[in-house]
Image (cartoon, coloured by chain):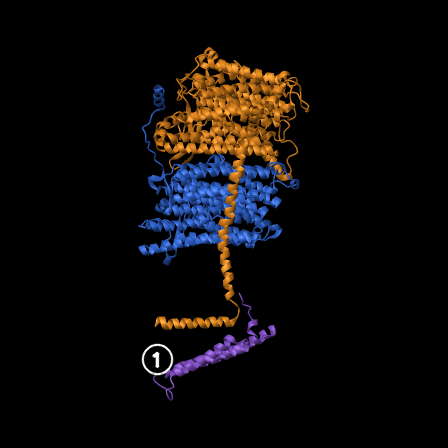
Chain colours: A orange, B blue, C purple
Amino acid sequence: MHLWFMDINTVWMVPLYPLLAFLAIVILRGFTDVRARVRLGHPPTEPVGNKMFFMALTVGATFLGLLHAVGTVSWLLGQEAGHVQAIERNWTWLQAGDFKFSLGYLVDAMSVMMLFVVTFISLLIQIYTHGYMEKDAGYAKFYSYLALFNFSMLGLVLSTNLFQTYIFWELVGVSSYLLIGFWFHKPSAAAACIKAFLMNRVGDFGFLIGILGFLYFSWGSWQNYLSVHPEQAVLSFQALGVLAPQVLGAAGAGLFSWICVLLFMGPMAKSAQVPLHTWLPDAMEGPTPISALIHAATMVAAGVYLVGRLYPVFTPSEAALPVVAIIGCMTALIGATIALTQTDIKKALAYSTMSQLGYMMAAMGVGAFAAALFHLFTHAFFKAMLFLCSGSVIHACEDEQDMRRMGGLRAKLPLTAYTYLAGTLAIAGFPLTSGFFSKDMILDGAFHYGAPVIYWVLTATAALTAFYMMRTYLLTFEGKYRGEAHVHHEHPWMVLPLVILAVPSLGVGYLLSGFFSEKLAFAHYIHFDFVPPGATAVHHPESLMALLTSPTTLISTAMVFAGLLLSWFFYGTEAGRQVPEKIRTAPVLSSFNSLFAHKWYFDEIYTFFVDKIYLVFAKGSAGFDRQAIDGLVNFSGQSVMGSGQALKQLQSGRVQTYIAVMFFGAVVLALFMIYCLY
Amino acid sequence: MILPEFITNHYLSILFLLPLLMACIVPLISEKNDGKYLHWFGIGGSALLFLYSALGWQGVVAPKTEQFSWIPSLGISYAVGSDGLTIAMVLLTTFLLLMACVASLTNIKKRLRLYYSMLFVLTTAVLGVFISRDFFLFFLSWELELIPMYLLIAIWGGPRRDYAAIKFVLYTLFGSIFLVAAILGIYFYAQNAGVLTETLFLFDSLPLMLGQGLPLTAQILLFSGLFITFAVKLPMVPFHTWLPDAHVEAPTPISMLLAGILLKMGAYGMLRFCFGFFPEAASVMAPYVALLAFINIVYTAGVALVQSDMKKLIAYSSVSHMGFVLLGLAALNPLGFNGAVFVMFSHGLVSAALFMCVGTLYTRTHSRQIADYGGFGTQTPIIFYFFLFMGMASLGLPLLVSFASESMVFYGAFVSNAFQQIPLGLFTLDWSMQTITILSALGVVIGAAYLLWLLKRVFYGPLQDRWKTLPDASRSEVFVLGTLAVLVLLYGFFPMQLTKHFEAEVSKIAQAYGKQQYVSVIPQKPCHLPGEKHTAKASRQ
Amino acid sequence: MYPLLNQMQQSSPLAIGDGVTLAHFLVLATVIFCIGLYGVLTGRNVIRVLICVELMMNAVNINLVAFNRFVEPTKLEGQIFAIFVLVVSAAEAAVGLAIVIALYRLRSSVNINDYNELKG
């Protein structure tokens, strides 16, 4: 039987399903709501339609997308590994003169991977959402936003060129803005959503300039290139690698590195890399399914994906990848250290996400291309699961998020607790979980990179990760219950996705590490043959056994166990319970503690910059506008009025003065005529 | 559809005079029933006008150029004509007039006869500006527009309406001095050159005439004169301060027209005259235009950020966005010019809608101070979502109409070869077109900041008790905002549906700038393939 | 010293009596005119101002007649003009006095300084 979704040429439909679902919800739900408000003056008292219908629309759209994803996966498996012939198609979207902006779809191993991750996780989270948002007034609205996000994200994944990427890049940003501010009556949510959008705008500004810079230096080459590759478009990803050396030649090494760094600003903001990361923890104001979907699994990982797409541009530059590595490394460390001090379960997970994204970026920077994307892949599963678990906990504890008022929840929420533990082990890199494979591939790549400091920072971060993740687990699920709220039971709709996600969280690394079949090895499809400067050779762990026995794995596994055990000692035993408090008050360590607890003072610095510098400048401009420019305008008007006022004094109203002036005027005129004209 | 031959032959003249006819009919209509008949005549008349102009837009009628001698001794003729650019602006005008008439339902309560006749006279004048093909007729329409606009602000405006209306008129008249000077300049140049003919001021013959060895200095003078005229209307910093006052005081429908159409007259004039007639002068002046564009975008965005009056904030944002028109024009290439025209359109839709949103809130609360608001998202969700949507459109969200237009401007400006540095008399500013574009792109960030901050302060957070009984948008308001929203979305998704109408025409104007309109970067070093380069490096180690 | 006057004296075809020339008439007219002007400029009483205006007009009349007599003796334009001026000034005096009476009823004053309604 021939099914349409197995055909690779129908991939363009994938983003359209959620778009149609979005429009359908807006029209069906929005129109009835507007009509009721306009006619009656108040919102409809009866629920509009069946709630499940809106859910079915969104979930159905995502499910169709997942079918396509399965189709593309089967297409990928049918290709000869290592030589995937990408499929690209473009349509002109906007044209001026002979310049065209195009939209289209690009199917290759990377986009297939992302397509699968996005649709799979979205589907599960949309099912979970029903349980989480069941009693919320904005149920249908929430599903419409989810569909909008899915549209944007899938469009981003399938982008053929940088211009299209920019479009969907911004659209995922706005979906994120809408969803963070979903409960907009809360001032904290209102502040968080605007912060997220603006910080991403700053990144997008750099991204846009980077795109323009690349276009500027490759301007003359596109016509020739596109005449050879008519199916591609201006700024096509597939063309970037071909044209990057030309751009390097035209721009020179310094300018080219700047273009790369500007391009990297987009991923920096989207993937919450230092210093554009502060929006991500605040984004936890959004409903938890959003934190799982957008701010953990998919959208924030898009930055890593884009760096992967831009790899052919970054590799010719001498500075680009080292910058990526350094930024990623800093993010990994800073995120992990802040996560140590967090008491809010979602905030802790958010900093953990930030740290893991830093991991991926660092991996990109050190040339471990496949490892970075593999970590993206595995991280999506277990981080989504962890967030969903936290959502289950928050839902059960009546919106309590502070871990100090939790504890012992395993009794009431057994499935949540076990899946959370599975996620903790996976993210910590416990041997043979999925996180273990991807993380150790990264560490392996970092080990073979020229700068040992990066390797050691990443290894230390691995230990920290194990420590703080175990801490969150222990504080939440073990010990005695410390809160006041009545703990509800798990919601069946919310447990199902958790259990499903636990499977890939634990097993997908094993499956795709190439142990079972070469055909299934992740790195055989997604790879980039490139030797970073300073590295010795292209390094691929040959087999599972080689990975398991390599020194880096042994070191990192030892660190992970140390982290887990220390955490257990501190938070799981009576003897160690006092230690964290002592550390907090110890002389040197306390200053570290306050540095971490204040999130390295990034927010303070930004607040200072915006409030004290930019707003003052803007107020100055406004004052200048009012006082100087408008003042000049009013002055010119008033000077005319004033001179009129002054001159009117001459009109005394006394006839005799007029006559006198007239007479003397006549005399002067007569004298003038007599002496000068004759 | 088969139309009578008379209409097809005199399509444009009828378009020109139809609103005038309506303005004459309006005083005959009864003001009874709270002006119900007048309102419906206004809406019906503008709808008729809109449909009539849509005939030309959709190509049902191919508008014919009409021309006959008017004052032969001075070389003045009556000439109307149309091309893609004109018909696009005409459609925008009639469409926004319809929207403004619907918006008048809830916003205008007094002296309706005078109101509607002035509205139609205004339309005639604006249409005259767009369709005239004779410089003198253009000037006449340009000046005619002032009178109804003055009255519309001065009679139906807010508390400081007299000040605002006088300021508007005086500012524009100040600009018109330069227009008169430029017209006289052309006239006397023609006299000296001995080419004084009966068709002296016709657009078609002007460039030909001016091409007859007009010295560059004279070209620059004429360019600058016209530029100042249009810059006042655009408005461009530092000639912009009439706009915040006029917008704040004008009633909502007039604000919509002011932002949607009247500003476009300036932009239109710039493209057609300054950049269309004087390519040599434009090439010389492009650096300054770009510099002013940058100041316009970034400076007014900063000013908008700290406004405490909602309508003033939107007014400044409107000024800021008109800076993109200048930037696109300074690019001197088809991409930039098309982008500039497209910005006119997108700005016309989006800023009109934003003014409508602000007006909708104002009619409910009678306050424009942002500090009085907060938490309206829960009380008036319809207004909130429209405001949010239009705010997103204004800050350039992709797949909404502003994004496509601003992208064209940015791409066009960035790959433009217009200039490498800006000579400023005493010193030379070493900024190329690319530098200016990068700096102007900052406006996009600030634009997002002020709009989102506005949304946050007005709609987000908790609601004050005194607003708990406010009604949401009414039917006519939903109609206006909904129609605009549909267009913003439609043209955002399918921008070619809009650009195809004027693309050819505008690209033709850009052709005068020859081959130097785009960069041509030649690699200074021989290319390496990535593989080669790095294996070489690897083997070295 | 006065080129215009000298020219006139030389060209005058006729003299009256013992060397009474045009200049004598002009000087007389000037003196009367200046007296009138002085009165107009200094007078505070509107009636006096009006009378002084009459004086100035009569000075002009002397000029008109004298010039006619000395420059174009064969024609009568100057005399006719003078009669016109007399007629008009009579009418003007009538209207002026009527206005003065009306003003007096309004303000109970004929002081010219009380009437500065057109002050800017």
Q: Nearer the viewer, residue A336 or A203?
A: A336
The kind of secondary structure element at disc 1 is helix
Q: What is the tally of numbered marks visible in this picture?
A: 1
Is residue B230 something one can see in this rendering? yes
Residue B226 place in picture, x, y as percent: 41, 50
x%, y% of residue B78?
41, 53
Q: Amino acid at mark 1?
A: Asn
Q: Chain of mark 1?
A: C
Q: Is residue A641 above or below residue B238?
A: below
Residue C46 position within the rendered picture, expressed as x and y whole percent measured from the top left: 54, 76
Report the residue at 52% width, 70% height from top.
A654
Q: Is residue A542 above or below residue C116?
A: above
Q: Position of residue A195 (x, y in %)?
A: 54, 33
Using the rendered view, name the quadrant where residue A284 is placed.
Answer: top right
Is C13 on the left or on the right of B481, as rendered? left
What residue would you read off at disc 1? Answer: C6
Q: Residue furthest front?
A: A587
Q: Nearer the viewer, residue A600 or A358?
A: A600
